[in-house]
Amino acid sequence: MRIITRAAVGLAAVATALTVAPFAHAQSGGFQLDRTEYGPGDYVTISYDVTARCEGKAKSNGFINWYSSEFEVGGPNTYVAQANASFVPGTYTAELTCKGETVTREFTVVAPRDKFTLDKAEVEAGGDISVMKTKQSDCGEVATSPGFTAPIKLEHESVNLRIGNGRVVDQPGTYQAEMTCGGKQVQVPFVVTAKAPAQTAAAQPKAVKSPIVKPKGAPQTGGGATA
């Protein structure tokens, strides 16, 4: 009898779990944000399915102007609106009324990360150039550019920097160095200037020899014996 009782209790627990699970899943409904992390000023896309029966605009003190745009049809059975994330880093809560209740979603605005820099904005044709980024940068390890003779890999380290060295092409012009930073292509412009004319040795004037001046001697007295 005890064995049957324990089995019955176990079955009852399973039944309870199956009953509660759908309800918990239903609580996760409502609206959705396209991401949970945004950069300052980034677009925030808010969406919900028609079955969520949401109404009004999404609201958050993490949105510029506090409110999203009006929701519009964004696909089959889907409504979509947009907002801009605050320029102030922090964690915020977006809220929207769905089925008569306030549904909330948390999101974070992160401080902009360092990108990358070049050691100079102008380089003479064929000259050296260095690409640098801080260790906090979200950029990759390779910089490319039509103005480089080859991709530059950032493989040298200093106290807080990653550095790569390379050369620029011989063709003067304005170019863009490019790296992938946080999943986006970031560009930094630089100019390749024409080579300065080669310095030729100035023709040295030939030394002019000074005429040889013979010192004047004693007056000629003539020779011969005296009478």
Image: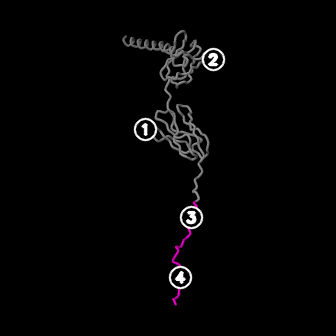
Is disc 3 placed on a helix, strand or loop? loop
Of all residues, the one furthest to the left in this rendering is 2
Whether pointer 2 and pointer 1 mark residues with C-beta atoms closer than 8 Å, the reply is no
- The scheme the figure's colours follow is one colour
Alpha carbon of mark 1 to alpha carbon of mark 3: how far? 58 Å
Is disc 4 placed on a helix, strand or loop? loop
Residue bounds of the magenta highlight: 204-227
Q: Is residue 212 inside the magenta stretch?
A: yes
Q: Is residue 169 inside the magenta stretch?
A: no
Mark 3 or 4 closer to N-term?
3
**Residue matched to label 4:** 221
- Camera-side mark, 2 or 3: 3
Whether pointer 4 and pointer 1 mark residues with C-beta atoms closer than 8 Å, the reply is no
**Residue matched to label 1:** 159
Q: Which residue is at the front of the view, 103 or 215?
A: 215
Of all residues, the one furthest to the bottom in this rendering is 227
Q: Which residue is at the front of the view, 218 or 87?
A: 218
Mark 2 or 3 closer to N-term?
2
Image mark for residue 73: 2
Mark 1 or 3 closer to N-term?
1
**Residue matched to label 3:** 207
Q: Which residue is at the front of the view, 208 or 112?
A: 208
Is disc 1 placed on a helix, strand or loop? loop
Alpha carbon of mark 2 to alpha carbon of mark 4: how far? 133 Å
- Camera-side mark, 1 or 3: 3
Question: Magenta residues: mostly which secondary structure?
Answer: loop
The amino acid marked with disc number 3 is Ala
The amino acid marked with disc number 2 is Val
Name which residue lies at 59% across and 14% down. 50
